[in-house]
Amino acid sequence: MFKKGKWRKAVKKAKTERKKLRDQLDKLWAVIVKQRAGNVCEYLGCNKITYLNSHHIFGKMNLATRWDLENGLCLCCGHHTLNTFSAHQSPAFEDWIKEHIGKERYRRIEARSYTIKKWTIEELKALVEEFKKEINSE
């Protein structure tokens, strides 16, 4: 970064098409998860409508379930990350999730999470269009 005694400006790399699509899908997925929950925290008795987050039941690092709409819950920030009893703080929260969504749905998502998925650009584009249609239909 040093050239003839002067700092060179760091050059920001342009996002690849795949990265742009992934970012777009993350945002669209979050909107749909919240819409499906009625824009309310799904934790029993909470019903908060502000500071909502979309939570992945099985982490978003897993591409097989990253944009799986069954794999999402709408939670307020407290039940997502901030409270001691939250999705990212309490191991017991998983038990609540199983009870809330049902063991069958949980097992279906879990089974899909064990698969390896390599998304093509065409598949990502198709999913973007599918998500946009769902958002516009609600």
Image: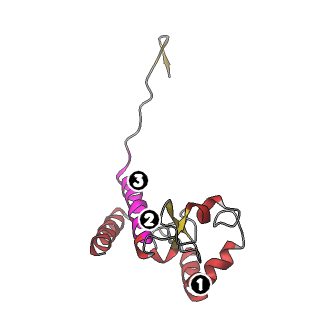
Magenta residues?
15-34
Can residue 36 be seen?
yes
Residue 30, disc: 2
* Mark 2 surroundings within 10 Å by alpha-carbon count, few (fewer than 14), some (14 through 19), many (20 or more): many
On the image, which quarter does residue 57 sit in? bottom right
Q: Nearer the viewer, mark 1 or mark 2?
A: 2
Q: CA distance from mark 3 to mark 1?
A: 30 Å
* Mark 3 surroundings within 10 Å by alpha-carbon count, few (fewer than 14), some (14 through 19), many (20 or more): few
Q: Position of residue 54 (x, y in %)?
A: 50, 65
- SS state under label 2: helix
Number of disc labels: 3
* Mark 1 surroundings within 10 Å by alpha-carbon count, few (fewer than 14), some (14 through 19), many (20 or more): few
Which residue extends farthest top? 5
On the image, which quarter does residue 122 sit in? bottom left
Q: Position of residue 28 (x, y in %)?
A: 38, 64
12 is higher (above) or lower (below) than 33: above
Can residue 119 be seen?
no
Q: Nearer the viewer, mark 2 or mark 3?
A: 2
Q: Position of residue 48 (x, y in %)?
A: 52, 67
Q: Amino acid at mark 3?
A: Lys
Residue 107, disc: 1
Q: Residue at x 48, y 70 (%)?
A: 117
Q: Is residue 100 left or right of residue 135?
A: right
Q: Is residue 2 left or right of residue 28?
A: right
- SS state under label 3: helix
Q: CA distance from mark 1 to mark 2?
A: 22 Å
Q: Position of residue 29 (x, y in %)?
A: 42, 66
Residue where numbered disc 3 is placed: 19
